[in-house]
Amino acid sequence: MYFEDVEVGARFTAGPRTIAEQDLLQFAQISGDHHPVHVDAAWAARSPFGQRIAHGPMGIALAIGLFGQLQDFKDTAIAMTDVSDWQFRAPIHIGDTLTLEVTVTGKRITRSGRGVIERGLRLLKADGSVAQEGRSGMVIARRGEQGPAA
């Protein structure tokens, strides 16, 4: 979808993605955050969570990755502009299956003529509860503009 095709209020869903132990371990390696609540099952069992949980920023990364799987924007998404008002609503555990709900909350043209859509992102657990949510802008190719896949 090009910028001109996107309507404010449009909704998209991506996923599902089930979280594996390896996901937590790889994120710990990439981020350098090896806190035992993420990587040590025995330690985490004694924590208020009762088990290991995903790193908070891992949820943001998962949401962005799931958005990248949306075929609607495969050839037109150019760059993320920001992440704001991100809220951690519930822990993400190994075995949780997540989906991403995207709502277009606004759109604008920058001074340089680029199209930007504003997105509300909600990372949902299988039971429909919100694990994380926030907002993020995305530069989207305008009709006639060469997108990244062209």
Image (cartoon, rainbow, N blue to C red):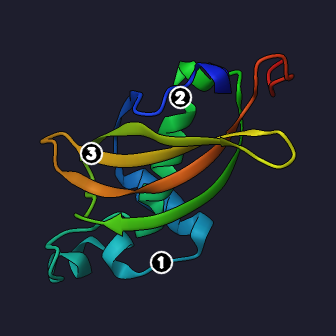
Q: Could you say where residue 119 lies in the image, as x and y percent from the top left?
A: 49, 45
Q: Can residue 55 be seen in this view?
A: no
For the residues labelled 2 and 1, the Cα–Cα distance comes to: 28 Å
**Helix, strand or loop at mark 2:** loop
Query: Closer to the N terminus: mark 2 or mark 3?
Result: 2
The residue depicted at 57 percent of the width and 34 percent of the height is 68
Q: Which of marks 1 and 3 is in front?
A: 3
Q: Is mark 3 on a helix, strand or loop?
A: strand
Q: Distance between the residues labelled 2 and 3?
A: 16 Å
Residue at the (55%, 60%) spot, across then down: 83
**Is residue 17 shown left or right of residue 5?**
left
Tell me, for residue 69, which label it has, or none. Answer: 2
Q: Which amino acid does label 1 sit on?
A: His
Residue 44: percent from the left, percent from the top?
Answer: 23, 77
Where 13 falls versus 66 (above or below)? above
Which of the two labelled residues, at mark 2 and mark 1, occupies the earlier sequence position? 1
Sooner in the amino-acid sequence: mark 1 or mark 3: 1
Q: In which quarter of the image is the C terminus?
A: top right
Which numbered tag is attached to residue 95? none
Please name the residue that numbered disc 3 is placed on: 124
Contact between labelled residues 3 and 2, with CB atoms less than 8 Å apart: no
Tag in front: 2 or 1 = 2
Under circle 1, the secondary element is loop
Residue 118 picture location, percent across and down: 54, 46
Horizontal and vertical percent for residue 147?
80, 25
Give 7 or 54, whichever is nearer the viewer: 7
Q: In this view, does 123 lie above or below 33?
A: above
Total labels drawn: 3
Question: Which residue is labeled 1 in the image?
Answer: 34
The answer to whether any part of residue 45 appears in the image is yes
